[in-house]
Image (tube, grey):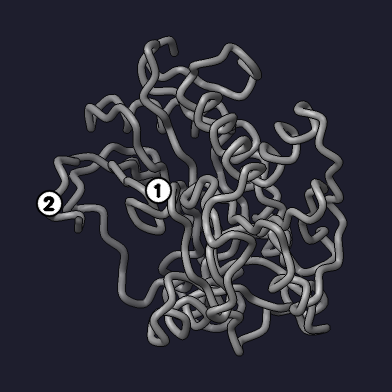
């Protein structure tokens, strides 16, 4: 479903609430030409206490940290961005939704250096269902290992969620889809497993859970951290600094993706090799259930992770 089919009306932009169709930028904006922007992808879930933004504080912290390598001054306090986000959700009359804060170098000059350009910032929210398909959460997805490699942190900071870097994700994901797969897995420059184009990756082997560490050129995912926490609370041994070779993917008992958009999505096949029994595995199912019980507030655990829109 495209934006034109959605009943959304308002975006917050540079301190003002503007009509959705009027939230525009100049064609010579620096961020458009050089990818000099940072962003977050956040979900709010529909609960019996109204919309609840999941781990908003952690997403905001990552947004401000992403700005640092680019010497970008966001220009608003976390409290101001929180107020704006809550108001955007209310003005659009949203329950469960996806939230996109973005900051980028705007319009003034077009040299590679952005020093003369303002930092613009916007926050939008809209309904967004299952990222990798409606049946993906239950039946899993087929993926391929991409021929495109993930850039190293010595080249571009991998701990910053930067707009321009998602060209790498686009290339990997579109290569997979052209070849009949739903999504890709990207290796790092050493040839070890990094992540998906927009997801972190987990592997289950002999009852132990492994996920590539931050040194493997991955983004430090907030849903990744959530699943690690939930798994350890349930008694699983989790190696969150794992080095996983490509070949190990094929012999895994279970594989799954995590991400704010993808949530917890099982992987059924890699390069047409069936993973485990070719269905959602028991560990994946347990953690997926725990995740949705948490975010949809069927449990009172981790209340500190939620910002309730109607109570602000």
| Residue 300 on image: x %, y % | 58, 11
Callout 2 crowding tier (Cα within 10 Å): few <14, some 14–19, many ≥20: few
Quadrant containing the C terminus is top left
Q: Is residue 29 left or right of residue 289?
A: left
Residue lying at 19% horizontally and 58% vertically, measured from the top left: 2
Q: Residue at x 42, y 74 (%)?
A: 32
Q: Which residue is mark 2?
A: 5
Report the residue that reaches farthest toward the front: 277
Residue mark closest to the camera, 1 vs 2: 2
Q: Helix, strand, or loop for circle 2?
A: helix
| Residue 155 drawn above or below residue 115 | below
Measured in 3D between alpha carbons, the distance from the residue under mark 1 to the one under mark 2, in whole angstroms, is 21 Å
> What residue sits 59% from the left and 29% below the top?
290
What residue would you read off at disc 1? 122
Whether residue 45 is visible to the viewer of this picture, yes or no, is: yes
Residue 18 sits above or below residue 48 on the image:
below
Quadrant holding the N terminus = bottom left
Residue 47 occupies which quadrant of the picture? top left
| Residue 56 in sight | no
Q: Residue at x 32, y 38 (%)?
A: 16
Side of 17 relative to 167 (left or right): left
């Amino acid at each position: 479903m495209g934006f034109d089919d959605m009943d959304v009306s308002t975006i917050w932009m540079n301190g003002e609430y503007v009509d959705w169709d009027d939230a525009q930028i100049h064609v010579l904006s620096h961020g458009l030409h050089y990818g000099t922007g940072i962003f977050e992808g956040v979900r709010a879930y529909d609960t019996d206490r109204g919309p609840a933004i999941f781990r908003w504080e952690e997403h905001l912290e990552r947004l401000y940290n992403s700005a640092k390598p680019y010497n970008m001054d966001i220009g608003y306090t976390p409290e101001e961005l929180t107020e704006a986000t809550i108001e955007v959700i209310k003005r659009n009359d949203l329950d469960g939704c996806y939230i996109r804060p973005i900051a980028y170098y705007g319009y003034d000059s077009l040299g590679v250096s952005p020093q003369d350009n303002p930092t613009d910032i916007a926050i939008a929210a809209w309904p967004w269902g299952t990222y990798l398909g409606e049946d993906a959460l239950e039946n899993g997805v087929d993926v391929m290992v991409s021929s495109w490699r993930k850039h190293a942190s010595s080249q571009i900071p991998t701990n910053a969620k930067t707009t321009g870097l998602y060209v790498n994700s686009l290339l990997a994901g579109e290569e997979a889809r052209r070849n009949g797969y739903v999504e890709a897995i990207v290796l790092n420059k050493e040839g070890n497993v990094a992540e998906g184009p927009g997801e972190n990756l987990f592997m289950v082997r002999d009852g132990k859970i492994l996920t590539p560490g931050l040194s493997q050129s991955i983004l430090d995912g907030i849903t990744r951290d959530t699943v690690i926490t939930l798994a350890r609370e349930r008694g699983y041994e989790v190696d969150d600094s794992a080095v996983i070779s490509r070949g190990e993917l094929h012999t895994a008992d279970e594989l799954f993706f995590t991400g704010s958009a993808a949530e917890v999505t099982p992987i059924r096949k890699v390069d047409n090799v069936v993973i485990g029994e070719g269905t959602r595995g028991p560990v994946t199912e347990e953690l997926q259930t725990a995740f949705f019980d948490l975010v949809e507030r069927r449990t009172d655990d981790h209340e500190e992770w939620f910002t309730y829109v109607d109570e602000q």
